Image (tube, helix red, strand yellow):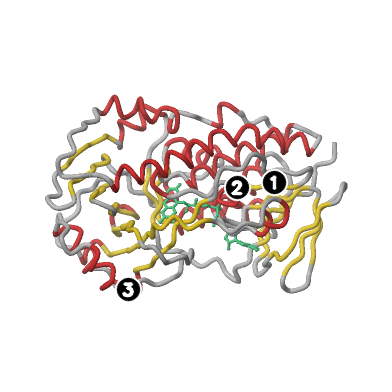
Amino acid sequence: MNPPQISIVGAGIGGLAAALALQQRGLSVRVFEQARALAPVGAGVHISPNGMHVLSELGISTDTLNAFRPGATVIREYQTSEPLFETPLGNTIEQAFGSPFLDLHRADLHQALMTQVQANDPDTVVLNKMLVSITEKSDEVTLRFTDKSQSTAQVVIGADGVHSVVRASLFDSLAAEYTGHVAYRGLIATDSLPDGLIDPVLNIWAGPGKHVVAYYLRNGELLNYVAAVEEPDWTTESWTTRADVAQLADYFVDWHTSVKTLIASTPAEACYKWALLVRPPMQNWSTGRTTLLGDAAHPMVPYMAQGAVMAIEDAWVLSHYLATESDIAIALANYGSARQGRTAAVQRAAWEQGQKTHAQTQHQSDSVASGGHFAKTQWLYGYNVCTEYPLIDPD
Ligand SMILES: Cc1cc2nc3c(=O)[nH]c(=O)nc-3n(C[C@H](O)[C@H](O)[C@H](O)COP(=O)(O)OP(=O)(O)OC[C@H]3O[C@@H](n4cnc5c(N)ncnc54)[C@H](O)[C@@H]3O)c2cc1C
């Protein structure tokens, strides 16, 4: 069979992971990205074992990721900082699930994927190509860009994020829904914080209607935090919208000193805000020649830290079907069937997790034993797409 020409819209984590997985299977791919340059985005991302299985199979070495390996997740009372629940990570989670749980700078992950993709084919990623429309015929798909250029392919993958043009053109044109939650994000040089202020774990301070997550990046050189608050009327979703540190501090005046010190230590240019948007799970996200991946297909709130991980899992499964099934429509339908149930379950679980965390009170009495916690996350972290859909050597 002749390999199909495959175009991906969007060079985010999902689009690049898909490009790399397709290249690994001997398929040729082009990625069209709207940005003029791939500038580093200053934020952290957790990659849980189910995502790390895939990155490892894609040849991304953890050494290139400058990762921080948190020792545990510790949920803390918001005013006293006393631990309410503690779940081991570090070696314990790696032994339980066969891959580590890592905290990464998003730019390091993005760069590692980009380097591998470009090493396979330096012309893979085409920048400054903003898709405006897509037309599918029985034998090909045409992409049109804002610069009036166009490109055709046999298969198109919409990895263009929560405001996906591919999704709007072929599936539903409804705007993503604002949850009423905003994530403020800050990045601080560790040496500018008081010694020992933040434990080397994944810290979560949980209080009524708000929570703060703080963890180290780049082998401990940086401290990243996300503060989730409820704001009724903010709807801009962007990695580059600056936030007002003083406004953020106002939300947390009665919180523990650790949280207040973190916010007060945030340089004005390193504080951003991001409206959290969702869409209900889709019943079907493929046509005969076009499909979706990552946030374009299943945007979710970040409270399970799984949006990028699900995009990485999608990339693996989609590339498996495109490499092993010659009928493109069947390959895309099989990919959708394989992914829709799992990603919908994660979308729901992430929202429920946010509700639980924001309802946390000082006198919370639940306790979660470490073994019990892993049992609860077995469905999520214990699933390995690489063994479910093993790589078949293209030769
Ligand atoms: C505060 C916060 C914390 C998070 N933490 C985690 C975490 O710890 N772990 C985790 O797994 N996930 C996390 N996520 C979720 C994660 O960031 C997303 O799920 C992930 O980035 C989705 O990747 P993607 O490639 O599908 O989309 P995106 O990252 O949005 O990439 C889409 C790409 O498409 C491009 N594009 C868009 N439109 C066009 C167009 N018309 N033409 C051409 N190109 C286009 C964009 O420029 C972009 O490069 C978090 C999210 C937030 C908001």
Residue ID for mark 3: 244
Q: Where is residue 205 in the image (x, y as percent from the top left)?
A: 23, 50
Image quarter (top left, top right, bottom left or bottom right) of the C terminus: top right
Q: Where is residue 379 in the image (x, y as percent from the top left)?
A: 45, 28
Residue ID for mark 1: 291
Which residue is at 17% across, 64% downward? 253
Assess mark 2: CB under 8 A from ligand 1?
yes
Type of amino acid under label 1: Thr
Judge the density around disc 1: few (<14), some (14-19), many (≥20) Cα neighbours within 10 Å: many
Image quarter (top left, top right, bottom left or bottom right) of the N terminus: top right
| In the image: residue 132, left or right of residue 199 | right
Of the residues under marks 2 and 1, which one precedes in the sequence? 1
Disc 3, SS = loop
Which residue is at 36% across, 71% downward? 243
Q: Residue furthest right?
A: 139
Are dots 2 and 1 in contact, CB under 8 Å? yes
